[in-house]
Amino acid sequence: MNFNTLFLKSFRVLLLPVAIIYGCIIFVRNWMYDKRYLKSASFNFPVICVGNLAVGGTGKSPMVEYLIELLKPHFRLATLSRGYKRKTKAYVLAGQHTTALDIGDEPMQFHTKHPDISVAVCEERIVGIPHLLQDVPDLQAIILDDAFQHRMVKAGFNILLTEYSNLYPHDFFLPTGDLRDQWSSAKRAQVIIVTKCPYDLSAEAKQKTIRSLNPTVTQRVFFTTIEYGTPYHINDRQAERKLTTEDEVLLVCGIANPKPLKEYLHEKAHTYYQQDYSDHHIFSIDDLNDVRKRYSEIQAEQKLILTTEKDAMRLMKFSDQLASLPIYVLPIRHYFLFDEGDKFNELVFGFIWNFTLMQRP
């Protein structure tokens, strides 16, 4: 553990009184929703929510994409996100000329990779859902991105993510820990997914984790690991380039938790250099010049720049300047361990089909 990490952890412990006050506020808020002093709205429509109890990267965006790829061949689909760090306000439905500045990097990623679905953003999901239903009359299901803690909307199917190395039962409230909601809120989820697991997770470790989560009798727990795809050029998805152990990589990323990505590069590349930015960082031309300069300083013959799909959405505004750079995007997806992907898929399909059957006269 380096000095900076030790200092940060010590500083967060000193903020324990603030964390306790924050936890009390969250407890009172949830209690008021549970007792119906504060109202949650339900929609006569299939709404699937993907979220977590903690801040940071648990893999929400890849899970939303997993659901999109699973469902869009069968249903008219839409996603609804907050649109973090966008320059617009209120409800926005993505269109032909939409950029990441209009809707945020993650929704822009959904819109770019899946132009055949509707992608919208709105700070208040309870406002955004009616807008979506009006704008897309033949809609059959909505996926709410990062909305588990927003209790004004009661989704019909909640998927709660928690990272294997930082399970919510072992965490604490912000700012001492990473929790933005209380542990007991997990009981609202129909499915809990433990993400970023080791690929070779043992059955014993699986059962130990399930005991730690202590799910209810009706909840299902699944385990996923990160599966990386073949990098493609930021300006051309068809121009792929496989990583080799001869490559030296300049990693340019502004995501909450780059640790798994760095571990992947440590295994797949000869070496890598870091150009780190804050989560959802909005890149400037000065940032691009810094990247170009840092890349030119790498002396290896086989070298490239690598970034994430989220970061690529915020870099695309420099597409002309990027054309001359070997800057590649590394796609990721969830891979279900223990051959349980089909069981998860059946639960999701079952929710929509059952909901549709129940609404028939």
Image (cartoon, rainbow, N blue to C red):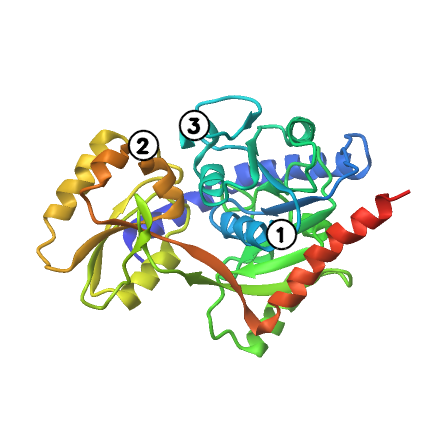
Spatial separation of the CA atoms under disc 3 and disc 1: 25 Å
How far apart are the two marked residues, 1 and 2, measured between alpha carbons? 30 Å
Disc 2: which residue: 317
Q: Mark 1 points at which residue?
A: 71
Q: Could you tell me residue 233's position as x and y percent? A: 29, 49
Q: Where is residue 311 in the image (x, y as percent from the top left)?
A: 36, 42
For disc 3, the neighbor class at 10 Å (few under 14, some 14 to 19, many from 20) is few
Residue drawn at the location 31% of the way across and 32% of the way down: 317
Q: Which amino acid does label 3 sit on?
A: His
Query: Which residue is most to the top?
Result: 89
What is the CA distance from the residue labelled 2 to the residue labelled 3? 12 Å
Disc sitting over residue 97 in the figure:
3
Q: In which quarter of the image is the C terminus?
A: top right
Q: Is residue 349 above or below residue 10?
A: below
Residue 242 appears at what percent x and percent y? 28, 62
Q: In this view of the protein, can residue 20 be seen by the observer?
A: yes
Question: In which image quadrant can residue 330 be found?
Answer: bottom left
Label 1, secondary structure: give it. helix
